[in-house]
Image (spheres, helix red, strand yellow):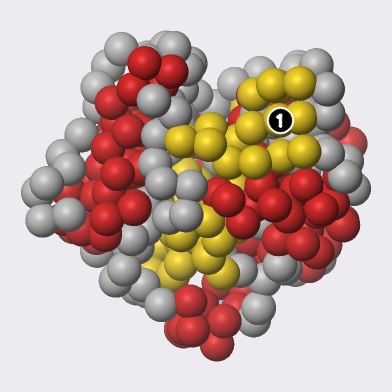
Amino acid sequence: MSSTKPVIVVVAATGKQGSGVVDALLDSNKFVVRALSRSIESNAAKALAARGVEVVQADIYSPTDLEGAFEGAYGIFFTTLFEMANKAPDHEVIQGKNVADAAQKAGVKHIVFSTLPSIRDISGGKYKDAVIFEKKAEVTAYIKSLGLPATFFNYGYFMTNTTRNPYSYRKVGVDSYELPTTNSVDAKMPVTDATGDAGCAVVKAFLNPAETIGQEYLIASGTLSLAEIAAEVARHTGKNVRAVRLSPEEAALHPFLRLPSIQEMNASIAEFGYSPHLSLESTIQTFGPEITFADFLAREKDVAFPE
């Protein structure tokens, strides 16, 4: 017997953002959840299917795959994925345009796109090469140009970067770790519970289309500096954790912070802010408050430090 619940498609359903959205959609019991996977035989895909998720094989670079996957769907949640190994400079834009075009053909009624603002615009052209931000901003502009019914979410710094990603830290001694940056350790940035409360906000957006379609939101619990984040992790774990600003020579050896686009992103955030055009107050009014970083650490319990 087919369900009368509306179908929400989650692209990249096993990633941090996608998995949080899947969890929240299932918990709401108001939608049929359809997940896209390049391989329905993967362990991750099988785990989703075991939870009652429709798993459909589709490649985000295949418009034909996406058109079939979106058939009969009410809504889509997606973000574009920055692939360090992908040498095509516009691969995120290709992903986003493929999803938007397929959604238009399928008659999807509501898209929630996890985007980022244009640092080029925020900085008045001073910083032009923060591709992770710029390419998502291009996709936002494309979705708007098609007139698609969409809500735009701007996630901040993922709280899970501090608990589930040991590569966020450098081990400098016994029970002693550093959170490195190319930026001032005191620069403020929004922090987001990407695997928890952010997914709940996506569900609320789908449940309230009249209020949320056409709107853009900063999804975060507040703003913290990396120094404040490190201090909170230290309090939670009892270990010595501090934020440090790398020298240019040290940054050149870091697998991620060496990228010019990341350095430009950090410099712009310190100088102009993360998303100065968006207000947390409007987010809280629409979706309610998000978990604090201290409470997030208490919920996660463990922190994955490097060996």
98 to 228, vertically: above or below: above
Tag 1 secondary structure: strand
Which residue type carries mark 1? Tyr
Q: Is residue 25 visible?
A: no
295 to 231, vertically: above or below: below
**Residue situated in front as seen by the camera: 15 or 155:** 155
**Residue situated in front as seen by the camera: 154 or 214:** 154
Where in the figure is residue 68, as x and y percent of width and height? 50, 36
**Residue under circle 1?**
177
Determine which quarter of the picture holds residue 176: top right
Q: Is residue 153 left or right of residue 1?
A: left
Where in the figure is residue 35, as x and y percent of width and height? 65, 40
**Residue at 83% across, 39% down:** 239
**Residue situated in front as seen by the camera: 144 or 101:** 144
Q: Is residue 275 left or right of residue 159?
A: left
Q: Quadrant of the N terminus?
A: bottom right
Determine which quarter of the picture holds residue 221: bottom right
Determine which quarter of the picture holds residue 37: top right
223 to 94, vertically: above or below: below
Q: Is residue 51 left or right of residue 195?
A: right
**Residue at 71% across, 39% down:** 241
**Residue at 34% across, 53% down:** 270
Q: Quadrant of the C terminus?
A: top right
**Residue at 71% across, 61% down:** 293
254 to 151, vertically: above or below: above
